[in-house]
Amino acid sequence: MDDIRRVDCFERLHKHLVRHQPDWQRRSEAIQPYRYRTQGETFFLTHLVALLSGLDEEAAEGKRRIRRIMMELDSDGGQSESLAERLVIREKALTPEKALSETQKNNLRLSRGNLARLREEIGADGRSSRDGTRAGRTPPLPLGVAFDVYLERHDNLPERIAATQRLLPCLSNLNTFRYLNRLGFPVLVPEGRSQVFLFRLGLLDRTSGAIETQLEACRVAESIAVLLKRSALEIDLWIRAYVGRVPELSPVASLCRSTPHCDACDLQTYCHYYRFRRPQVSGGTVALPIKEWRPSEQPRERLLHNGAEALQDVELLAIVLRTGTRQCNVLELARRLLEHFGSLSAIEEASIEELRKVHGIGNLKAIELKAVLELGRRLVYRPLQPGQSIESSNDVYRSYGLRLAHRKQEEFILLMLDNKNQVIREEVVSRGGLDASIVHPREVFKVAIRASAASVIFVHNHPSGDPTPSHDDFVITQRLEEAAEFLKIQVLDHVIVGAGRYYSFTDGETVDVPIETVASSDE
Ligand code: SF4
């Protein structure tokens, strides 16, 4: 997505948030004060306890339980006792239904040693306080302030994250981001849902709990912040509010959840998820033009790199159609076309006028479609060429079987041959229902005489797929044979084409020929 589209996308997102939360400005500002420096040690510990115990410090119940744990910590030693000792949280501090899991307890116990080291490393006991005075001469820095000073030494996000995890390895990757954010450091929280959102918009290549992916998500939000001249924390908050991860802003209409409410979303034109999960764009919504898709998803590019066989019918059709309409992209148009006719062979059967009835298919597109499908058909059935010898009814079926088998109306063809049984040419005598008045001997043999044919073969199809001759077929054949005899033109055969079968009047029987055999026998 280029910069202009990124800006537009996030401006739309912001407008949505403001529209649904008129008090947005005040509320969102209240969420992100740089609170840590004005708070003491309790603040530092409260968030650590909340993250490690898995309690929600925003919910009333969570707050109550955390308060109880903190009181327990206080009563465990007071100010004089070391922090590491005080952070050993006893299970009895929690209500039974929310007892700490073994892992959480271990995490907290692990933090004893880590916090002791933390005190040493960041100088919370006064040994390396900001004014450089020696241990014992000055009162210890409050842990929170000392931690702040410690992190100031690391001026970029990856290093800050690494430094925090060095001190507090009990924090998971995401909890480290959360912890720093909660303390008030300008650190984004690349939660899974935020990552999914960025991924859906094509701004992130993958989603995962790996620190690299999380840092990449932060970089994306930071780059958008630069474009919009906002702070990265603001952008992060917008994203988290949009994906429903900011309880303080619960009245906001969060759309991009695990079940996204795409119908109400203004980001549809930018969203890959929307395009692929909601291909049936309708109701006036404009789908993203194909040229704005990722190259790897565009039908032409896919054909280029994966070969034509890898493409679905709808993608091949889209390539032939080339362009869509204002209302739908070309892939959507191809899908409509297929749905309208039901299959490729039905499209091939359709007339130009019928094709034009599909909205978006004009004269030119219909003609091009017919030409391409006809080429494909000819490659399969290989029409008889002048001079080609006909030796049996099977030769006739190999040339006309695939061509006529799926026709929805009857077609009567006159095949004219010379005295060596070589093809002169063919003539379509009639289309539609066959009866004696349509296939009139005079009309049939007028053409044969003009072509100086020595012999002829009649071919027609049964749309039902059953080539068994009807009473009319016998009558017509007999009348044509009588006329031919009078004109001294030999009637070699009358072949009726069905689905995978044909009937030969000369052989006097129905022959089953699987279509695959017909196709392969031509190669
Ligand atoms: S269109 Fe749907 S999936 Fe895409 S960003 Fe909007 S809500 Fe999320």
Image (cartoon, rainbow, N blue to C red):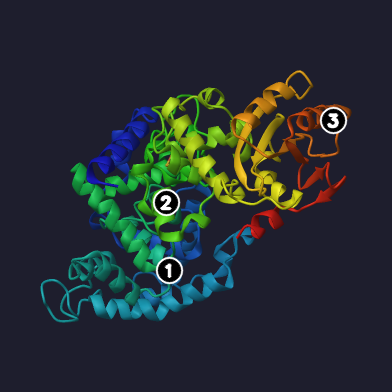
Q: Position of residue 224 (x, y in %)?
A: 25, 48
- Per the model, the C-alpha gap separating discs 1 and 2 is 36 Å
The residue tagged 2 is 297
Neighbour tally class for label 3: few under 14, some 14-19, many 20 plus, Cα within 10 Å: few
Give the mark, 1 or 3, whose residue is nearer the N terminus: 1
Give the mark, 3 or 2, whose residue is nearer the N terminus: 2
Circle 3: residue type? Gln
Ligand 1 sits in quadrant: top left
Neighbour tally class for label 1: few under 14, some 14-19, many 20 plus, Cα within 10 Å: some
Of tags 1 and 2, the one toward the viewer is 2
Secondary-structure class at tag 1? loop
The residue tagged 1 is 172
As drawn, 135 above or below 228: below
Which residue corresponds to the image point at 41% horizontal and 63% vertical from the top-left? 175
**Quarter of the C terminus within the rendering:** bottom right
Residue 408, can we see it? no
Circle 2: residue type? Glu
Circle 1: residue type? Ser
- Per the model, the C-alpha gap separating discs 1 and 3 is 90 Å
Neighbour tally class for label 2: few under 14, some 14-19, many 20 plus, Cα within 10 Å: few
Q: Position of residue 322 (x, y in %)?
A: 40, 38
The residue tagged 3 is 478
As drawn, 87 above or below 352: below
Give the mark, 1 or 2, whose residue is nearer the N terminus: 1
As drawn, 197 above or below 369: below
Secondary-structure class at tag 2? helix
Of tags 1 and 3, the one toward the viewer is 3
Of tags 3 and 2, the one toward the viewer is 3
Q: Position of residue 406 (x, y in %)?
A: 69, 39
| Nearer-the-camera pick, 147 or 79 | 147
| Nearer-the-camera pick, 13 or 430 | 430
